Amino acid sequence: MNSNNSERISAGALVCVLLVTLVWGVNFLVIKIGVQDVPPLFLVALRFAFSAFPAVFFVRRPNVSWTKLAAYGLLLGVGEFGMLFIAIKLGAPTGVSSIVMQSQVFFTALLAAFAFKEHIRTHSIAGMILAGIGLAIFIVPSLRGGSSAIALLPLSMILLSALFWAAANLVAQRMPGANGLSLMVWSSLFSPLPLLLLSWIFERDYLSAAVRGFSLVSLGSLAYLVILSTLFGYGVWNQMIMKQGAKRIAPFSLLVPVFGVAASALFMNEPLTPVSVSASLCILAGLAVHVRGAYAKPKGAAPR
């Protein structure tokens, strides 16, 4: 049976996806460190430039159209990460950002249902409701201007970033024959130039100082973003989506805020408030419902 049609998630896929979520949880902390000295759009441009070069000379181009490669690269690089880096630069707390980004799960399921007529199973709906409650626990204080709130501009940019991530998930699902790493490397070709242009328009006053002051800390942040978060993280993530399907893999990103909040509290001294703890617990419960349903045998299924 094709794994994309199976409701079960293999143990190997589970381990890979969990490792990626750990890398991505810490990624928010690394972004916060990186944008302290380097303008956000310029840092994203460097991230994708070094994700493409020199790897593009050694990794075979995936057997997919240039249009799909360009769409994925623009959605991921310019859309998702352009918005996310700016939001964090504007003051969005890293732990909070990692939580709000998980609205991509809802966007992925809804876009898949709308564009591809994919059926959303009951356990997925229940999991999304629980996770939605978790997101609401955090977002409502922002709308009311409470002490645990994040400013509406960075909050809106994070939600837009999540929408771009969901769209990128669906583009990846439409490329089932592509290798995850090669897709990441070759699609990264399309991100740097638009990002550099946007950086020149909006960040030109800060670029020369950023280049002169590029430190070992900045270099370390860039290396993490390129090697671990982009090449390893998205290479594995794309491969899992192609094999298992976006609906099954995307909800695992709900673990990212758990690691993100923990890393932020440990290394950035961001407080573990009742809001962040209760929101994370609801999100984790939503993931548990989704995973339990994915492992459950459908009614009437023949024993194996």
Image (cartoon, rainbow, N blue to C red):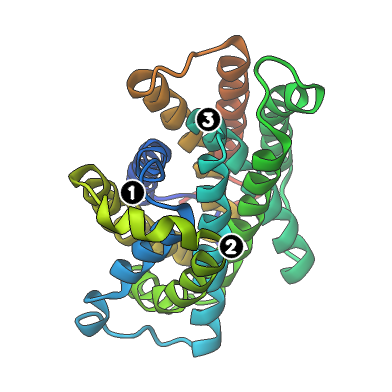
Residue drawn where x is 52% and y is 41% of the image = 88
Residue that badge 3 annotates: 93
Image: 184 above or below 271: below
Q: Earlier in the sequence, mark 3 or mark 2?
A: 2
Q: Where on the picture, by quarter, is residue 90? A: top right
Q: Which mark is residue 16?
A: 1
Q: Where on the picture, by quarter, is residue 146? A: top right
Residue 241 is situated, as x and y percent measured from the top left of the image, at 48, 61
Q: Earlier in the sequence, mark 1 or mark 3?
A: 1
Disc 2 is placed on an element classified as helix
**Residue toward you, 163 or 148:** 148
Instruction: Report the number of discs.
Output: 3
Residue that badge 2 annotates: 79
Image: 6 above or below 186: above
Do the CB atoms of the residues marked 1 and 3 lie less than 8 Å apart? no
Circle 2: residue type: Gly
